[in-house]
Amino acid sequence: MRSLADDIQERGLLQPIVLDPQGGLLDGRGRLKACEIAAVEPAFVTYNGSDPSGYVLSVNLRRRNITKGQAAMISAKARSESEHQPSSDSEHTARSVSEQTGISLGRVSQANTVLQHAPDLVEAVINGAMGLDEAYTTARENKAKANSAEVQLARLREEDPELADRVVQGELTLAGARAERTERIEEDKRQRRVATRLLDEVVPPLAQTRGTRTFSRYDPAYASGAPVTRETIAHAMTALAEMDQVWQERDLP
């Protein structure tokens, strides 16, 4: 950095710093820092293309003296950003990046793991402050911790405190609690489907009788089920009022 700053002070900034249309830094972080050290006003240009991530990938991979680990990290990050897909889809992303850049599949897979489980180390790898192998080791440790029983129990406590308490008390294993949690969710879905189907069958026909002579033509002799009484009507009005309140609370149309 000191050498770059001296060169810029002597010959000026030969390659301007590249910004995206929003003013974010795309390329030239090191040159910008060197300009600050050299007390030289930096020159900026704006990238107006349609693929800023691809531009960053191309520029960075053309740098000399970068390691395979840096290249893999740069490539994986650029692909993840350009496709707006989670790095957890590591197999597909790694193979795609490997084919396009010639970097080994194993190195890109390691970079994807760092992206997902140790994102705070990505820039350190790209800048050369940390090797990809070291960052990958940390990322694997983070991944293991995320899957640990302690973390799973904490997650269960957020979702269902009662089940978490039963695990702590030894009444359930963690796996058993997760299974019961899944069963509860499925049962809730089933009840929601039944309730929705019932309301879909009852409410629209009732709404269609508004403004018609249906009410005045009602005859208990032709009732196919339980006859409608004034008490039934009162209960229906109460139910519709409650339904309207729930719809308002849920901001449903």
Image (spheres, grey):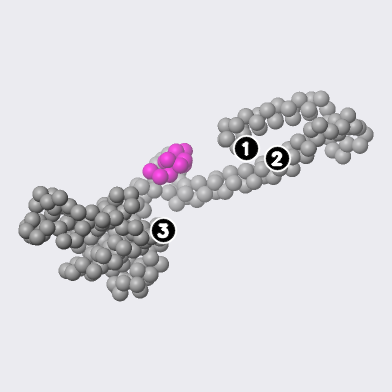
State the SS at label 1. Answer: loop
Label 1 CA crowd tier, 10 Å (few <14, some 14–19, many 20+): few
CB atoms of marks 1 and 2 within 8 Å: no
Q: Which residue is mark 3?
A: 85
Mark 3 belongs to which amino acid? Gln
Q: CA distance from mark 3 to mark 2?
A: 39 Å
Secondary structure, magenta segment, majority class: helix
Residue in the image at 33% along x and 49% along y: 22
Query: Is 38 left or right of 79, judged from the image as shown?
Result: left
Q: Quadrant of residue 96?
A: bottom left
Vertical placement of residue 93 versus 167, above or below: below
Q: Label 1, label 3: how many angstroms apart (C-alpha)?
A: 33 Å
Q: Is 66 situated above or below 173?
A: below
Q: Which mark is residue 199?
A: 2
Three-letter code for the amino acid on which mark 2 is drawn: Leu
Q: Is residue 44 visible?
A: yes
The segment highlighted magenta reads 154-163
Query: SS for tag 3?
Result: loop
Residue with the mark numbered 1: 253
The image quadrant that residue 69 belongs to is bottom left
**Which amino acid is tagged 1?**
Pro
Q: Position of residue 73 (x, y in %)?
A: 27, 63
User: Could you tell me how far apart the alpha carbons at marks 1 and 2 are, in whole angstroms?
Assistant: 15 Å
How many residues crowd around disc 2 within 10 Å: few (fewer than 14), some, or many (20 or more)? Answer: few
